[in-house]
Structure formats: C-alpha cells, structure tokens
Image (cartoon, rainbow, N blue to C red):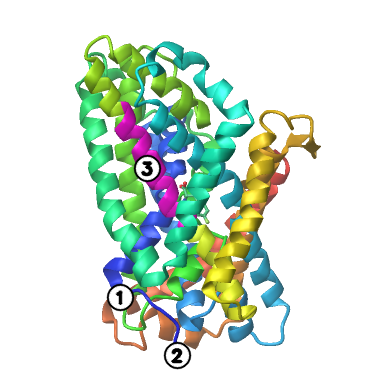
Amino acid sequence: MSGRENFAGAVGAVMAMAGSAIGLGNIWRFPYMAGQNGGAAFIIIYLLCVVFLSLPIMLSETIIGRSSHSNAFGAMEKIAPGTGWKWMGLLTVISPLIILSFYSVVGGWSIGFAVKSLYPGFDNSVSSVFGEFSSSAWKPLICHTIFLLVTAVVVKAGIRNGIEKFNKYSLPLLFVLIVLIAVYSLSLPGSEEGVKYLVKPDFSQVTSKTVAYAMGQSFFSLSLGVGTILTYSSYIKKDTDILKASASTAAFDMLFALIAGFAVMPAVFAAGIEPGAGPGLIFETLPFIFVKMSAISPVLSHIVAVLFFLSIVIAALTSSISMYEVGTAYLVEEKHMSRNKAVAVIFAFTWILGILCSLSLGPLSGLKIAGLCVFDFCDVLTSNYLMTFGALLYVVFVGWKMKRQTVWEDFTNGGRQDINVKVFKPLYFLIRYVAPIVVILIFLSNLTL
Ligand code: PFF
C-alpha cells in the first residue's frame, strides 16, 4: 500500500514489539507468579508455554499483519473479503482500547509515585500513600491524563518518528535501569531468600492450575490476541524474518521478566515482608522497602525509588503506545481520518473510560458491573475473555481460513528464508491444531473461574 509508513528495519520492529510486550505484567505479575508456583519449575513451564503456544499465536498475528499491511479490521477484510471475519477483527480493535483505559490509570499512578518519591515526606507517610492516592478523586485523574497525553504525543508523531524512535531509546534505558535496581536489590543483606523464592525448583507446587496461570501470563505478557502485534507487524518490511522477530520479542520479554524478578523479590525478602501481587506489590510493598532502606542510606534509597518508578512509567508507556496505535491505524485506514484526528478520537474514548476506571476505586466504587467495579470489570473482561478469544480467532484464521501456501509464502518471505522452512511444518501444526484446542480450554477454564 503506497504512502503507508513502515519500521525502518528489523531492529526497530523488534524493539517496538518488545516494547509492547514488556510492561506492568513483567514487573508486578511475573515475579510473584514464579515465586508462588514453584520457582524454577514455573519458569520452565512458562518457557514451554511461550515456545509451544504463545509463539505460534504471535506468529499468526504477525502473518496476518505483515501479509495484509493493514489494521486489525482491514487485515481480515483484505485476506477474507466479504466474510464476517472483519467483525471479529473489529473486536480486536476495541479490546486494546479497554485495556489502555485502565492501564493508563496505573501508568498514571507510577508517574504520581515517581514524583512523590522525590520528596522527603514520602518516607513518613508511605504505608497510607497508595490507598489515599488511588482512591482520591483528582490526583490519579491528573496523572492518568498526563500518561495518556504522553502516549498520544508519541503515536501522533507516526511510526518511524514516534513509535520506533521512542522504543529504540527507551527500551535500552529500561534494561539498564532494571539491571541497576536488581544489582542494588541483590546487594541487600538477606536478599538470598528472595533469589531462592524465585528460582528454587519446587515441582510439588505444580498443578494443572500452574499451567493455566503460565499460559495466561504468557498471553498477557506478550500482548497477544488484541491486535497490537498484528498492527505493529503490518509495518514490518517484506524482507524481515518474522520468525526471528517474534522469537526475539519473546526472548526479550522473558529476560526482562526474570531481571524484574531479581529486582523485586530480593528486596522484598531483605525487608522481611511477605510478597504479594498486583498493584499492592509495586505501590505498597516496594515503597515501604525503600523507606526501610533509607535507614541505611537515605539518599540512595530515594534514588532507587525514583529510578524504580521511572522504569515502571517507561515500561507502561511502551505498552500503552502499542494499544493506542491499534485504534489509530483503524480510524486512519478505515474511517479515512487524519492521524491527528484519529489520535484525538482515541484519546477522548480512553480518557473518559480511564476516568471511570480511576473513580471506580474511590468515589464511584458503588457503581458495579457484573458485581465488579469498572476498573476490575475492564481488567477481567479483557485479560480473561477478550485476549483469549482474540488469540483463538487469529490461530483459527491463519490455520484454517488462510491458504497454506499464503501462510508459507509470508513465513518464508517467498521461500527465501531457508532456515525457516524446516520449522514451518511443526509451527503450522501447532497453529492449526494445538493452539486452538489449548486456547479453547483456557477460555472455558476462565469461564468457570
Ligand atoms: N504486555 C503488556 C504487559 O506485560 O504489561 C500488557 C499488554 C500490552 C497487554 C499491550 C495487551 C496489549 F495489547
């Protein structure tokens, strides 16, 4: 398609996809999940899930995006014109916008905490800071607005000048920051217990639930089933090896999750605190630890706290940008809007839904949907249902709707990538048979939760 932007090269494409994958899920969910579910045993299962399930799903999204060079809705229409598939595609345009709305609220908290931790008063009031902050009306809304605005500015700047550039600089910075924090965390007295918690293999903890958790985590962590990988792949050039790009993305994501584990858990154990999950871990436990450590070196613990929240902000931004782009590409290509207008429309939608999510933790907590507050409803709806449904859609589309020859051509770049040919057969088998069955099972098990 002439006039359509693309990533300058394979490195930029991988950085963008890895940026989408690496996010809050790596920092607040992975370390806790690994610790709770058998340490190294969980990590091994997680790795197997990534290779045999998530990678085939990711490749399916990549193939749909790259072969159509279209947004998540247009791609379906282009490959299967006149069928109902485009409406399925439309679903995967909407779901990332729902995720973005509450993700931006959490991104906003991180901005708020990065700023708060600059001030000395942070030390004294920390135990109550998070509850007060997240349930108050105005502060989180201002932070949500700032977070979403920064995301919008990057997306508005375009694929190469905005998204590719931002990821190219921020991802290496993010790795440096998290490694520094991990080194600091590992240097604290008593940190060895945290390392043990994370890596000691304990197969007695492994049940069928563990496998389901590992799968769910790998979906969320790799941003699967919601059109982000598809949309980014539509900007990948025809000569880029997509297997290499997808595998590198998964590898970076895994590596980051592990380092984040070593940044978080040793500090938690050094402070003698029970590890928890979710926002509590990042916004309650860790600030408390930074305060405790300030007895040892006040300046250093302040610096670590600021850097830690800064790295969360960056990780969240690189993910939110990818979600924002899904809707933007759709509006530009299908509704023929200018990029500026599309960015404004997406802003309006996610800003308002984000406000509802944020207020639902405080003043609007009485407003329930299916027994959940708006924030939790959006989270459960997307993580448990829409992501798995989207993933199923993509593997069935590539495995059963697209012609095998078309898939092969795209996978091998027209037969030029010899190495990939050998792995095509098993991967195609995984996409066609294994992934759909497993994803249906996960979907059903989520229904019974
Ligand atoms: N992969 C991101 C994380 O681990 O935090 C979350 C995410 C990003 C989910 C983009 C979905 C998405 F479209």
Mark 2: C-beta under 8 Å from nearest atom of ligand 1: no
Disc nearer the start of the sequence (2/3): 2
Q: Which residues are magenta?
A: 305-321
At which x and y percent is residue 338? 56, 76
Dot 1 corresponds to which residue? 8
Dot 3 corresponds to which residue? 44
At which x and y percent is residue 346? 60, 61
Whether residue 219 is visible, yes or no, is no
Which amino acid does the dot numbered 3 rest on?
Ile
Residue in the foreground of this view, choosing between 228 and 149: 149
* Left or right of residue 26, residue 325 in this image: right
| Disc 1 to disc 3: CB gap under 8 Å | no
**Residues at marks 2 and 3, CA–CA distance in whole angstroms:** 44 Å
Which amino acid does the dot numbered 2 rest on?
Ser
Question: Who's the residue at 44% across and 29% down the image?
Answer: 282
Disc nearer the start of the sequence (2/1): 2
Pair 2/3: label in front: 2
Whether residue 446 is visible, yes or no, is yes
* Left or right of residue 432, residue 204 in this image: left
Q: Which mark is residue 2?
A: 2
Main secondary structure of the magenta stretch: helix
Q: Is residue 320 magenta?
A: yes
Secondary structure under the numbered disc 2 in the rendered image: loop
At which x and y percent is residue 258? 32, 39
* Left or right of residue 354, residue 319 in this image: left
